Image (cartoon, coloured by chain):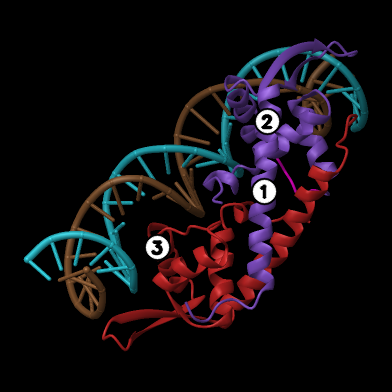
Chain colours: A red, B purple, C brown, D cyan
Amino acid sequence: MAIDKSLLTGSTTMLVLKLLDGTDMYGYQMIEGLSKQSNNVFRLKAGTLYPLLHTLEQKDMLISYEETADNARVRKYYRITKKGRKHLHEKKEEWKTYTAAVNDLLGGAGFATV
Amino acid sequence: MAIDKSLLTGSTTMLVLKLLDGTDMYGYQMIEGLSKQSNNVFRLKAGTLYPLLHTLEQKDMLISYEETADNARVRKYYRITKKGRKHLHEKKEEWKTYTAAVNDLLGGAGFATV
DNA sequence: TAGTTATATATAGATAATCTACCTATGGAG
DNA sequence: CTCCATAGGTAGATTATCTATATATAACTA
């Protein structure tokens, strides 16, 4: 079974959807949280995230709403949709398939004769 | 510890170096072998591989030599260099770090408060 | 023996994801 | 009042990969 070729570059999408699968969040929160959560392995850039969120919203995987925080600052929250959850599930399956295959190749002896 | 941002898209490089870490191979052999070895999860395209091999050779990670097979067909074999092995080792470490972080996020409960 | 498929390598141009670099705006700390 | 953190955003460049195309020969098939 072949997997989506965009998986490699597309894991950011999966992570964003996964974050929102837990709770509604706003962009800046995702950037900071992802960085801390992963011990700085992920350093999601604003220039990557915001356009991605807009794209996901256009594809009906997210919806957004504004909310004013205690400090009167307006934040734009995102909530995952049913379609987004379905997409997340698919991406997770692809991720498992792909990483299992890579780990198999990295761990295995390789193939000398074809 | 942060990792190379090109890791996601760059795993093809790692796989190619890993293949050559086992034995010298020629391009077509890698394409066919990788496909069979991974049950078609990897479908490395000629248009991806050949330019990549040329780039890796320019970076002194590979050397190439031609050899005539039994059927009189000329094949261009590639051999990994010391520099290539060093790069492979680094890429593998990045791969481990990155996949561990993703799996942690995918498996974990996520973070609600930041 | 003529046509198709497999082997083998290669390049050009398109596509897509991410990055860098910039911009706006407000709240709070010094 | 100035600087930093917070918060959201866009434009253009970079890079990896893909599709499409090209060449050439071996091997199979009708």
The CA span between labels 1 and 2 is: 14 Å
Taking the spot 26% from the left edge, 86% from the top edge, the residue there is: A72
Circle 2 or circle 3, nearest the eye: 2
Relative to D6, residue B23 above or below: above
Q: Which mark is residue B86?
A: 2
Q: For the residues tagged 2 and 3, is the chain the same?
A: no
Q: Nearer the viewer, residue A29 or A53?
A: A29
Circle 1 or circle 3, nearest the eye: 1
Q: Where residue B99 sits: x, y (%)?
A: 67, 56
Q: Which residue is mark 3?
A: A51
Circle 1 or circle 2, nearest the eye: 2
Amino acid on which the number 3 mark rests in the picture = Pro
The CA span between labels 1 and 3 is: 26 Å
Q: Magenta stretch containing residue A89, yes or no?
A: no
- For label 1, the crowd category at 10 Å Cα-Cα, with few meaning under 14, some 14 to 19 and many 20 or more, is many
Most common secondary structure along the magenta stretch: loop
SS category of the residue bearing label 2: helix
Which residues are drawn in magenta? Answer: B40-44
Q: Where residue C9 sits: x, y (%)?
A: 68, 20
Taking the spot 55% from the left edge, 74% from the top edge, the residue there is: A19
Amino acid on which the number 1 mark rests in the picture = Trp
SS category of the residue bearing label 1: helix
- For label 2, the crowd category at 10 Å Cα-Cα, with few meaning under 14, some 14 to 19 and many 20 or more, is few
The answer to whether B55 appears left or right of B88 in the picture is left
Q: Which mark is residue A43?
A: none
Q: Which residue is mark 1?
A: B95
Taking the spot 62% from the left edge, 71% from the top edge, the residue there is: A88
Relative to B106, residue D27 above or below: above
All told, the count of numbered labels is 3
Chain identifier of the residue bearing label 3 in the image: A
